Image (cartoon, rainbow, N blue to C red):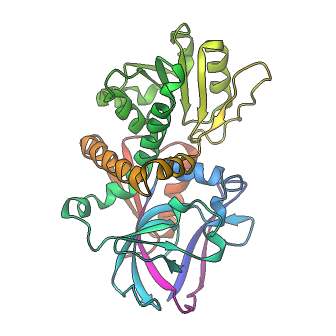
Amino acid sequence: MMLTQVQVGRKDFTQAQIVQLPMPVLADGDVLVAIDKFALTANNVSYALSGETIGYWTFFPCAEPWGLVPVWGFADIIESRHPDLKVGERVWGFLPMASHLVLTPGSVGARSFVDAAAHRAGLPGVYNAYQRTQSDSPDLTRLEDARCLLFPLFSTSYVIYDYLIDNAFFGAEQVVIGSVSSKTGLGLANLLAAHNGGPKVVGLTSPGNIGFVQQLGTCDEIQTYAHLDRLDASVPTAFIDMAGNGDVVSAIHTHFGANLKLSCAVGATHWGAGRFQASGDGPGHSFFFAPAQFAKRDLEWGPGEIMRRAQAASARIALEMQAHLSIQHETGPEAVVAAFQGLVAGTTRPEVGIMASVTRP
């Protein structure tokens, strides 16, 4: 048995290679998991784009110029040298695009544990936690695919939503969501639409995605990127950018001027576009780092409470959106490469969710 990895070019995400390595030997305290399935979304392209700046390449090291893109998925323990974790146990969390992974559990609790591997010590804790699924409710078990595809993205949506509430929406009376057809954008629109007395929700998307966004009914207004001039520039506005297209961000800044109260980057669905460079006399365009808001609320609300709320919101939104999404299954390393490259190229439809496995059945 060999360990199979799908490695992506760190500088050029269109490049990928399939690598087979000897199965690792476990040290005391380690467990070996077989990766069953994981989600592939535009969020994984954002992880690659932020691989150097935030450290996503560090979670699962491999030799440069290649990198292992993190994904969210399920894995089963097939070998254990840890006294509290048994062969056959199923876990959910941050994984590489690979067939197997060695974890070094620390702080093992009844419902979760943390990977205490030395190379992950300085990385955000929210990504190092693995959920033990043996005590999951039947309802949660039935949502396995949605848990991979949607929960991490909708949890990010929830934390952005909480960030806006935490700051009284920065005085904005409308929130403009760039790439609202992305899963994180859809989740944020859903949360804002349900907020009693909240700001107007405006979605930006490409012409081909307007129908899909309209049928969800969570935006008060939808515009294409070519018609940004139709947005009401007299209204104090917060801009939450999922796309990362510098030209669009620049146009938003120019259009709203002093009425732009917040300009915030979350992801980069348009990863190949130029980045926005703020001028000295305009509002900044900051990067929203979800783990920082998680950490803030852990201090204020108690450890794990914001994650509990985010997961509850994610489950609600996932159930509401089930009828609007179709799941596409991709199996084998070649299929994983093709699926990831489709996301990089931007050809994957927003109503499609990809569940993948490197291991062939």
Asked whether residue 43 appears in the rendered view, the answer is yes
Residue pictured at 54% horizontal, 24% vertical = 170
Q: Where's the C terminus, which quadrant?
A: bottom left
Relative to residue 7, is residue 348 depicted above or below? above
Tell me which corner region of the image, top left, top right, bottom left or bottom right, holds residue 36: bottom left
Q: How many marks?
A: 0
* Residue 92 as seen in the image, left or right of residue 120: left
Q: Spot the residue most to the top.
A: 234
- Give the magenta-colored segment's residue range: 16-38
Residue 211 image point, x, y percent: 35, 27
Q: Residue at x 53, y 42 (%)?
A: 346
Left or right position of 17 against 159 = right
Q: Residue at x 61, y 20 (%)?
A: 252
- Secondary structure that dominates the magenta span: strand
Q: Which of 196 and 24 is in front in this view?
A: 196
Left or right of 73? Residue 128 is right
Query: Image height check: is 35 above or below 313?
Result: below
Give the image location of residue 332, x and y in percent.
45, 70
Any magenta on residue 48? Answer: no
- Give the residue furthest to the right: 280
Who is closer to the viewer here, 212 or 135?
Answer: 135
Can the viewer see residue 205? no
Q: Depth check: give the residue in front, 120 or 63.
A: 120
